[in-house]
Amino acid sequence: MPKAAIDLTARAHAWLRPVLAPGATALDATCGNGHDTLFLARAVAPGGSVHAFDLQDVAIERSRRRLDGAATGAQLHWYHQDHAGLAAELTGVRLNAAMFNLGWLPRSDSDLITTPGSTTAALTAAVALLRPGGRVTIICYRGHAGGASETAAVQAWLERTQACVLAREPDEPADPAPLLYVLTKERETD
Ligand SMILES: C[S@@+](CC[C@H](N)C(=O)[O-])C[C@H]1O[C@@H](n2cnc3c(N)ncnc32)[C@H](O)[C@@H]1O
């Protein structure tokens, strides 16, 4: 995916670090080349687990190889399937964090991109599994064909989700710079 002026992946990791600790549970909804999965695995180890989805075989293979090489000690669960079906796979799982790094897989078929219907279905499912105080990050890329309409669908979804938006970065994005959204689910109060 194109590089943003600020590194939004690094920013997403920074937003998630405070809600991750050894023993925590995380979701990587688009594992791609495994960079985010590796970050999550390191943050939840030892004793934690990461659930990683991707539609492409090559993405699962690359991510597995990266994680095998890193031997983080986290429990890893791989799902070679559409993340829209994540609720059926993650029955009983409660998430501390979820990452959605949208778009296409670098060094691969750039026609295979995340799409509005699957993305918003998966976001709804992830928010339902999120623990109070947990966080979800979404990186939307607007520069490729389909990117602007997916971003518009995510923005419309943000209007109706029960999660609240903690941040959007950058503050003043140039068009069509990528956007990072950070969501949280309110902690229950007494
Ligand atoms: C920008 S890449 C993700 C980068 C990745 N997080 C990393 O750290 O390398 C987007 C990924 O989303 C995957 N993808 C596209 N549609 C999907 C879907 N419906 N369900 C799951 N993964 C999907 C693509 O195959 C691609 O690997």
Image (cartoon, grey):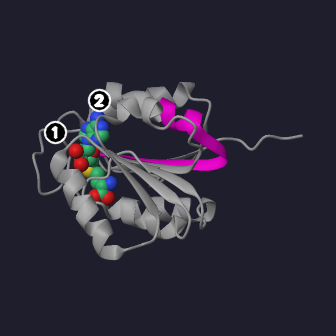
Position of residue 69 in the picture relative to residue 119 (left or right)? left
Residue in the picture at 34% in, 24% down = 117
Asked which secondary structure carries label 1, the reply is: loop
| Residue range highlighted in magenta | 124-142
Label 2: few (<14), some (14–19) or many (≥20) C-alpha neighbours in 10 Å: some
Please provide percent x and percent y for residue 24: 59, 58
Q: Is residue 67 magenta?
A: no
Which residue in the structure is indicated by mark 2? Answer: 149
Residue 134: which numbered mark, if any? Answer: none
Q: Amino acid at mark 2?
A: Ser
Position of residue 12 in the picture relative to residue 33 (left or right)? right
Residue in the picture at 24% in, 52% down = 60
- Asked if the beta carbon under badge 1 is closer than 8 A to the nearest atom of ligand 1, the reply is yes
Q: Amino acid at mark 1?
A: Leu
Which residue in the structure is indicated by mark 1? Answer: 112
Residue in the picture at 61% in, 66% down = 21
Q: Which image quadrant is residue 190 in?
A: top right
